[in-house]
Amino acid sequence: MAASKDIRPKITLQSTAGTGTRYITTKNRRNTPDRLVLRKYDKAIRRHVDFKETR
């Protein structure tokens, strides 16, 4: 049912530490048209690192 131009699409955030840890969240496409980067906890290395949006 979700259209390809959904206002709040689901996105995947992947760890920049190279551990393969991922988070799934949503973002508002109107407010944040660029790729999202959030600092979140990586369970594999037990510290906070940057997570970047993947497509």
Image: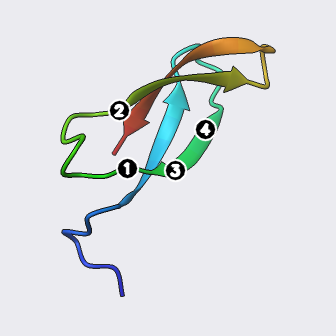
The residue that label 2 is drawn on is 36
Q: Is residue 17 above or below residue 20?
A: above
Q: For the residue labelled by badge 4, is the local secondary structure a helix, a strand or a loop?
A: strand
Residue plotted at (18% across, 51% down): 30
Q: Which is in the foreground here, disc 3 or disc 4?
A: 3
Q: With 25 as the anchor, is 37 left or right in this view?
A: left
Q: Please, what is the three-letter code of the amino acid marked with disc 4?
A: Arg
Q: Is residue 7 above or below residue 15?
A: below
Q: Which is in the foreground here, disc 4 or disc 1?
A: 1
The residue that label 3 is drawn on is 25
Residue 33 in percent (x, y) is at 18, 42
Counting residues from the start of the chain, the first of labels 3 and 2 encountered is 3
Q: Please, what is the three-letter code of the amino acid marked with disc 2?
A: Leu
- At label 3, counting other C-alpha atoms closer than 10 Å, the crowd grade (few under 14, some 14-19, many 20 or more) is few
Q: For the residue labelled by badge 3, is the local secondary structure a helix, a strand or a loop?
A: strand
The residue that label 4 is drawn on is 22
Residue 1 placement: quadrant? bottom left
Coloration mode: rainbow
Counting residues from the start of the chain, the first of labels 2 and 1 encountered is 1
Q: Do the residues labelled 2 and 4 touch (CB within 8 Å)?
A: no
Q: Please, what is the three-letter code of the amino acid marked with disc 3?
A: Thr
Q: Are marks 2 and 1 in contact (CB under 8 Å)?
A: yes
Q: Nearer the viewer, residue 8 or 42?
A: 8
Q: For the residue labelled by badge 2, is the local secondary structure a helix, a strand or a loop?
A: loop
Considering the image in quadrants, where does the C terminus appear?
top left
Q: For the residue labelled by badge 1, is the local secondary structure a helix, a strand or a loop?
A: loop
Residue plotted at (56% across, 49% down): 24
In the rendered structure, find residue 27 and report the number of the disc placed on it: 1
Q: Do the residues labelled 1 and 3 touch (CB within 8 Å)?
A: yes
Residue 42 in percent (x, y) is at 71, 23
Q: Please, what is the three-letter code of the amino acid marked with disc 1?
A: Lys
Structural distance between the alpha carbons of marks 1 and 3:
7 Å
